[in-house]
Amino acid sequence: MLIYPAIDLRGGRVVRLTEGKFDQEKSYGDDPVATAKDFAAAGATWLHVVDLDGAKDPAKRQTALVEQLARDSGLRMQTGGGIRAESQIASLLAAGAQRVIVGSLAARQPELVRGWLKKSGPEKIVLAPDVRLDDAGIPRVAAAGWQESTGVALDDFLNSFLTAGLAHILCTDISRDGKLTGPNTALYADLARKFPALQIQASGGVASLDDLRALKSAGSAGVIVGRALYEKKFTLQEALAC
């Protein structure tokens, strides 16, 4: 299981949001490049970068900073945040990213994103369905920065992309994000069982090394770790070792 230390960028700073809410931000420093270098020195091989400014306004994308992170850290990178056009994917790949994360647009314009998958290839795009569980416990895909539900069941969403060659998904249980309350391990175990061909990245709630062990046992191929590292719940070296 790969550990993806996370850097969320806002105004050039390293921040974390709670449940994706911009009014619930906590800053963790003004030098994301130094943070990325620290991750590399600790033994990381990948970096997960979200451009929060770009997610709100495409005109404010921090592509130059993303390029600097890729170049100066030496880490492989997956990155996204409000991807709305094929040209943005091309720009981020040219900037040094290995994979680009596509979220809300995949739920809103699935045919368009299926076309991107077929054209770019399954190793270049990560679909990021962010979900909330409904009253029946069924995960349903959210959009618009997690503020609205599409009503689409996660299983149906994923099935609709398999024929386009989908290989990588990053699934966040919104209710756990940024809260250090533990991940929804049952969700990822269910996904691994239903979609054995997919490389599933877990996101949201990781707070301990035991959480990482549980996600690995559940069949997760990767896990995004952010606030737990910044709040020193464990070190990146410990995470990689376990």
Image (tube, helix red, strand yellow):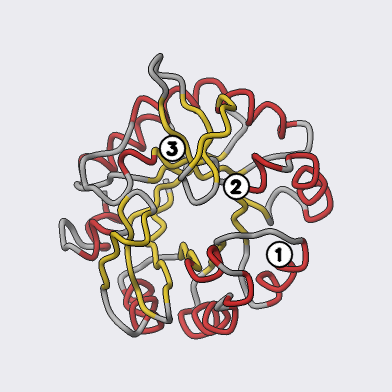
**Which amino acid does the dot numbered 1 rest on?**
Ile
- Crowdedness near tag 1: few (<14), some (14–19) or many (≥20) residues, C-alpha within 10 Å: many
Residue position for label 2? 104
What residue sits 33% from the left and 77% below the top?
Answer: 35
**Nearer to us in this view, 143 or 79:** 143
- Above or below for 169 versus 75: above
Picture coordinates of residue 174, whole percent (x, y): 38, 41
* Residue 152 sits in quarter: top right
Seen in the picture, residue 207 relative to 35 is either above or below; the reply is above
Q: Which mark is residue 53?
A: none
Q: Circle 1 sits on which residue?
A: 89
Residue 58 point in image, percent of width and height: 63, 70
Residue 15 falls in image quadrant: bottom left
Q: In which quarter of the image is the N terminus?
A: top left
Secondary structure of the residue carrying numbered label 3: loop
In this figure, which residue is indicated by the disc labeled 3?
220
Left or right: 181 as drawn, with respect to 74? left
